[in-house]
């Protein structure tokens, strides 16, 4: 058996998949209730990971990094697709169930999440991968998308790095999620002016176009195109308003005319 290669300082660390989560308005929770709320989030995440048959990050040396109001979870790269689907949908569903059973004195639990992949040194967590994961989590696009979740009765929004999207959704490795479930956007962070990366925003239960009005940094290509009927109706309407005259050289029905022209005067006299 060949001896393992000796690691050099400039060697690229092994690639890992990363999921970051963050509780909305954690700092506004009364101090006496912070620990209980955070414990509830940890229990929900642990249960959903088990449901998705995902490994426990705490069994990987350095695989769990507490961030106070959230955490960064590390996984082997082979499970990347499951970190998108079914994890995100089931995590949102678990938060919905929690809300239905929540005592009035307990805070509402809403989460932002991000999913990324890249080389990362353990157990010291040195590398751009963890920095980019947290910035995707804190991006303006991800924060704004949480309003879409609230308005639709959801409790989760997630920002995927472009490489995660390409390896999972675009590659067809997500069974219940397709491209229309994601909004193409640009991740920017207010206090990190040098950070700007393409990302995909996902709000479980919504399509990308439904989230689009909430996100300032949505890519222009993500805007919903006008239906063909609306595009062709404008010239016809303009012609009608200008008093244009139309001659038909074959028999037509009134509905056919009305669908194309706003106002029409039909002369039914036989010639």
Image (tube, helix red, strand yellow):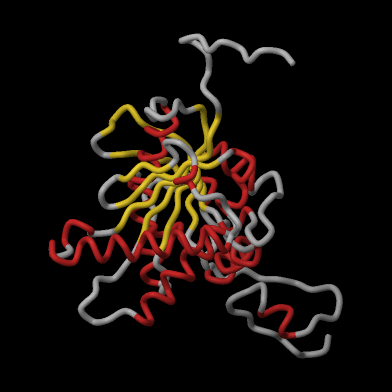
Question: In x, y percent, where is residue 252?
Answer: 81, 80
Residue farthest bottom in this picture: 269
Residue farthest right in this picture: 250
Q: Is residue 221 left or right of residue 147?
A: right
Question: Residue at 30% of width from left, 57% of height from top?
Answer: 23
Q: Is residue 187 left or right of residue 105?
A: right
Q: Is residue 15 left or right of residue 94?
A: right
Question: In x, y percent, where is residue 8?
Answer: 50, 9
Q: Nearer the viewer, residue 16 or 239?
A: 16
Q: Nearer the viewer, residue 156 or 142?
A: 156
Question: In x, y percent, where is residue 142?
Answer: 38, 51
**Above or below 19: residue 269:** below
Question: In x, y percent, where is residue 110?
Answer: 34, 64
The quadrant of the image that shows the C terminus is bottom right
Residue farthest front in this picture: 1
Picture quadrant of residue 150: bottom left
Residue farthest left in this picture: 31
Picture quadrant of residue 177: bottom right
Question: Residue at 48% of width from left, 10% of height from top?
Answer: 10
Q: Nearer the viewer, residue 142 or 216?
A: 142
**Above or below 176: residue 248:** below
Question: Residue at 79% of width from left, 73% of height from top?
Answer: 248
**Above or below 163: residue 204:** below
Question: Residue at 40% of width from left, 63% of height from top?
Answer: 43
The number of numbered discs placed on residues in the rendered structure image is 0
The quadrant of the image that shows the N terminus is top right
Picture quadrant of residue 228: bottom right
């Amino acid at each position: 058996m060949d001896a393992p290669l000796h690691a050099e300082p400039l060697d690229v660390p092994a690639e890992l998949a990363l999921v970051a989560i963050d509780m909305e308005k954690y700092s506004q929770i009364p101090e006496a209730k912070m620990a209980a709320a955070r414990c509830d989030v940890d229990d929900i995440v642990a249960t959903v990971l088990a449901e998705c048959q995902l490994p426990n990050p705490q069994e990987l040396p350095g695989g769990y990094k507490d961030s106070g109001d959230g955490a960064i979870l590390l996984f082997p790269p082979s499970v990347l697709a499951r970190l998108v689907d079914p994890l995100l949908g089931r995590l949102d569903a678990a938060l919905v169930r929690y809300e239905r059973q929540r005592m009035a004195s307990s805070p509402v639990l809403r989460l932002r999440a991000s999913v990324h992949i890249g080389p990362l040194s353990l157990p010291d967590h040195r590398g751009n991968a963890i920095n980019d994961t947290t910035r995707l989590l804190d991006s303006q696009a991800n924060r704004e998308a949480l309003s879409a979740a609230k308005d639709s009765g959801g409790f989760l929004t997630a920002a995927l790095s472009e490489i995660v999207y390409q390896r999972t959704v675009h590659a067809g490795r997500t069974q219940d999620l397709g491209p229309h479930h994601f909004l193409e956007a640009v991740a920017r962070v207010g206090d990190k002016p040098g950070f700007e990366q393409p990302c995909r925003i996902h709000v479980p239960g919504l399509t990308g176009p439904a989230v689009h009005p909430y996100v300032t940094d949505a890519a222009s290509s993500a805007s919903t195109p006008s239906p063909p009927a609306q595009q062709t109706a404008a010239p016809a309407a303009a012609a009608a308003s200008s008093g244009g005259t139309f001659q038909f050289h074959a028999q037509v029905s009134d509905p056919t005319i009305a669908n194309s022209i706003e106002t029409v005067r039909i002369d039914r006299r036989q010639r």
